[in-house]
Image: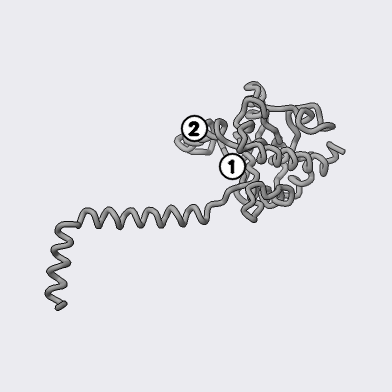
Amino acid sequence: MTKDEFHKKWENFWYYHKNHTIIVVIAIVIMTVLIKQCASRIFPDLTVTVVTKSVSVSQDQLNDIQNMLQNYTVDVNRDGRKNVVCDNYDFGPKQDPQLVAALQEKLIADFQATNSALFITDDAYFKQFSSEGILAKLSDVIPGAPDKLSVQLSSLPDFKNSGLSADNGKLLLLVRKYKGSPLANKSNIPYYNNSINVLKKLLQDGGLVK
């Protein structure tokens, strides 16, 4: 085939199949990106939801907490890694109002679908969550634990050693009720059990559970 013949065949092909070719190329690019994202996506074994208004937790502090909790979690999803993620919802006054609105919508969606049983909040959100009846007493999920809905991070040495400031120590650790929540879904039960085991170890290290 000469160069001119090839050129004519290509022009003929492109004339009749231009749109189809473009669609196929775009589809291949999209699939490549999606496959790459799925391959690199982290599936956490433990998720802790951090919701604050009066005290901000920096990304470095969140990383320190995640690294600390990796010592206690198990590989629930059996992907060969122990991954912990802190979902941070900072509703502080310095936040952009549009970002706050987006975070509020995301928090509502997460409440309906998340497998996160552990929460870190300030006093304002503790009062809100407790009034909504979504929290469990520590003693209800761990025998011998304090008969209350929260424990201060400052009373747990693992958090005190994780780069938190004095203000962060005022934050509270909470556990969500199992019954009537997404935690009771069959696929979420192993993650819930892992969260309770992690909570128990934290309380034991703090001398709050034998």
Tell me residue 15's x, y (percent): 14, 59
Mark 2 or mark 1, which has the lower sequence index? 1
**Residue beneath the point at 82% across and 41% down:** 204
Secondary-structure class at tag 1: strand
Q: Position of residue 142 (x, y in %)?
A: 79, 33
Residue named by callout 2: 105
Is residue 115 visible in this depiction of the protein?
Answer: yes
User: Which residue corresponds to the image point at 45% horizontal and 36% vertical from the top-left?
Assistant: 98
The N terminus sits in image quarter: bottom left
Q: Position of residue 74 (x, y in %)?
A: 70, 48
Figure quadrant of residue 167: top right
Q: Few, some or many C-alpha atoms within 10 Å of disc 1 (few <14, some 14-19, many ≥20)? A: some
Pick whichever, 44 or 134, lies toward us. 44
Q: Is residue 5 left or right of residue 37?
A: left
Name the residue tied to disc 1.
87
Q: Amino acid at mark 1?
A: Asp
Dot 2 amino acid type: Glu
**Residue 120 seen in the figure:** no
Callout 2 secondary element: helix
User: Which is nearer the eye, 201 or 187?
Assistant: 187
Q: Residue at the far front: name it.
A: 1
Residue 80: quarter of image: bottom right
On-image quarter of the C terminus: top right
Q: Residue at x 73, y 51 (%)?
A: 71
Q: Is residue 91 above or below residue 134?
A: below
Question: Which of the 4 image quarters holds residue 208?
Answer: top right
- Picture residue at 55% right of the left edge, 31% below the top: 112
- Cα–Cα span, label 2 and label 1: 14 Å
Where is residue 128 drawn, in percent x and y?
A: 63, 25
